[in-house]
Amino acid sequence: MSPRVGVITFPGSLDDKDAARAVRLAGGESVALWHADADLHSVDAVVLPGGFSYGDYLRCGAIAKFAPVMEKLVDAGNGGLPILGICNGFQVLTESHLLPGALTRNDHLHFICRDQKLRIENNTSAWTSDFQIGEEILIPLKNGEGGYVADEKTLDELEGEGRVIARYLEINPNGSRRDIAGITNARGNVVGIMPHPEHAVEKLTGPTTDGLGFFTSLLKSLVNDGKVSV
Amino acid sequence: LNIDGDIDDAKLAQIHEIAATLLSNPVIEDFTVEVQG
């Protein structure tokens, strides 16, 4: 039985179809979840995709956190359900306090779209176990509010507990503190990342297939945890 | 925020909650509540 991975669509979500395709390419079954539906339909994991949920009104992710599906998702995330937030999904996760810190306007004030080199810093989370620590990957980045910020205590905790999962290499594209591109929660089941692994899963359309590792990591961790069998 | 009627402690507490959980993100923003009119 393939792992069932939910992909939530909010009004303004942009990359839900790409995330669902990445799930399928990794060997999972993608399950469409609707923002207004307060039910996770017994999925084994959830992806919060990129885009502009609720038009980014007020702050990116600020309104999405009140969507009916989020109440169940926050409880499930705190209970160990694997959740990956990509770009706007990362913003939703910080606004929902499943991850610490916040994403702010890029320091140069411009929307940026480029292929971005990253270094993997953590391979113990549910979404990064298929990588090697120190592995360099190249995946697309596209955001206007991608600057990761947190207070010094929180940043030190993230560093000390090995919860920075990826860092920008060669250039810091948005002013993120300590070059942070992605983080995980203490349990390792919730991951947020600003660049887009779901856009780098096929040679035809991506700069690489490096992003597939996030999705194969999930499937392997679900199998290793006995949550699903293949 | 436009509030109908008088502002009592309960309404003020509700306004503070709205400011802290929706209108601002305390990680990156501060807020003050000022009653006018």
Image (tube, coloured by chain):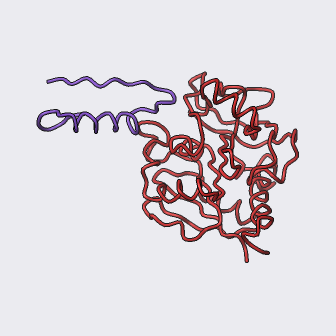
Chain colours: A red, B purple
Q: Position of residue A134 (x, y in %)?
A: 87, 38
Q: Residue at x 48, y 50 (%)?
A: A12
Q: Quadrant of residue A126?
A: bottom right
Q: Position of residue A147 (x, y in %)?
A: 61, 30
Q: Is residue B3 left or right of residue A60?
A: left
Q: Is residue B32 left or right of residue A24?
A: left
Q: Nearer the viewer, residue A21 or A123?
A: A123
Q: Quadrant of residue A148?
A: top right
How many numbered dots are placed on residues in this image? 0
Q: Position of residue A35 (x, y in %)?
A: 46, 58
Q: Nearer the viewer, residue A131 or A32?
A: A131
- As displayed, is residue A216 above or below residue B8? below
Q: Residue at x 72, y 26 (%)?
A: A178
The C terminus of chain A lies in which quarter of the figure?
bottom right
Q: Quadrant of residue A170?
A: top right
Tell which residue pokes out farthest to the bottom in this image.
A1
Q: Nearer the viewer, residue A51 or A204?
A: A51
- As displayed, is residue A138 above or below residue A14? above
The N terminus of chain A lies in which quarter of the figure?
bottom right
Q: Residue at x 65, y 50 (%)?
A: A190
Q: Nearer the viewer, residue A142 or B27?
A: B27
Q: Position of residue A131 (x, y in %)?
A: 85, 49
Tell which residue pokes out farthest to the left in this image.
B5
